[in-house]
Image (tube, helix red, strand yellow):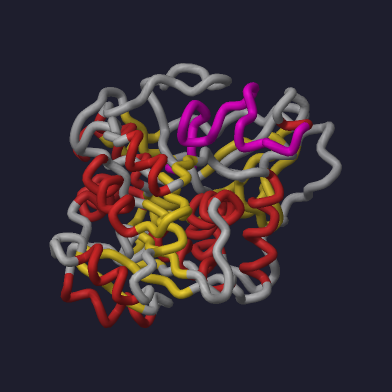
Amino acid sequence: MMAVRLFEHGGPEVLKYIEAPIPEVGPDDILMRVHATAVNSWDLRYRSGNLPQPLPGRPPWPVPFQLGRDAAGEIVATGENVTRWSPGDRAVQLPHPPCRSCALCVRGLENLCIDTAYPGHQVFGGYAQYVVRRQDAILPIPDGVDFETAAATMWTYTTPLNCARQAPVGPGDTVVITGASGGMAIACAQLAKLSGATVIGTTTKPHRDEALRKLGYDHIVHSTDPRLPAQVRELTRGLGADAVWDCVGGNDFFQLSLSCIRLGGTVIVLGTPTDQGSRLELDALALIGGQVRIASLRGATLRDQQLCLELLADGKITPIIDRAFPLAEAAQAHTYLESQRQTGKVLLLP
């Protein structure tokens, strides 16, 4: 098979399009022919070597490695113990596969599983023509949903579904979503609108205002404009946002989030920028005085991942695909994503 792997950290040029053996299928595994995989900001971070310390329950970051948190395709072979799947079935890999038996999984906190390895993190990901997965680490693609849409959905929407539980919004509420052009931010906007909230998106690219409004944002404000906090308060009748879902991360956007939130509101940190540090500054007196809740979240539960496909099947969410590249052009896809010219998801087609 053909695959894209990195053998050292660096720029897009370290991604090598190579011939590799088709992975072996174990007794509890399925072999999937990958039809589409997504390029995510995590892939850029891993490739460049800008990696955090592994989280509890995670092995070290391996090199050589094969990226790809998302993969959708067709099952072509199954192990001898597999009873749920057959060749020809269409499936998408779980971006957050839980072990289902550790102390946190049995509490329904599969996103905090302490005995798992993620595809594209420690397990070879979807940048290849074939991948092997455990039979319980995939879900069926709903009828009427194509491979590209499935690959553009799972990681992008599952974490925002978890976010919607941590900082819920509903009718009459306002949520600010940073980095409005990104795939995860667009997912956040769609889910917030499903809840009945008013959605304000931030962008550094004023020329995209009209296009972003068509994607579900009620208002667009510019994160480079020093009047942004005042604009948010004008849009919320002086109150401030009920929640900020920060998809960009970094201290600058953290401070911006705090300046937009109402008394008693919630700031959720979803991401960290690939080109900045991860440290955040916080004034404890301001935090207490505003009774602001600061929260973070890690991944998605099994139910989040199942619900994601249910919403997709019902037409309640619609991932935006900006552009698809052949797998052989993975380096170009990384360059394109790093340029921040995209609106929505960037895909690779093996």
In the rendered image, is residue 281 in sight?
Answer: yes
Magenta span: predominant SS is loop
Which residue is painted at 69% across and 64% down in the image? 310
In the rendered image, is residue 154 in sight?
Answer: no
Q: Is residue 305 magenta?
A: no
Which residue is painted at 63% across and 23% down in the image? 114
Q: Which residues are magenta?
A: 107-128
Q: Position of residue 93 (x, y in %)?
A: 60, 46
Q: Nearer the viewer, residue 211 or 104?
A: 104
How many marks on residues? Answer: 0
Which residue is painted at 65% across and 51% down in the image? 304
Q: Is residue 309 above or below residue 55?
A: below
Q: Nearer the viewer, residue 237 or 203?
A: 237
Q: Is residue 124 magenta?
A: yes
In this view, which residue lies farthest toward the top? Answer: 60
Which residue is painted at 20% across and 38% down in the image? 275
Q: Nearer the viewer, residue 228 or 107?
A: 228
Q: Quadrant of residue 171?
A: bottom right
Q: Position of residue 123 (x, y in %)?
A: 52, 29
In the picture, measured across the screen, residue 124 lies left or right of residue 207, that is: right
In the picture, measured across the screen, residue 40 lies left or right of residue 47, that is: right
Q: Position of residue 88 (x, y in %)?
A: 71, 56
In the picture, measured across the screen, residue 84 lies left or right of residue 348, that is: right
Q: Is residue 154 above or below residue 314?
A: above
Q: Nearer the viewer, residue 218 or 126?
A: 218
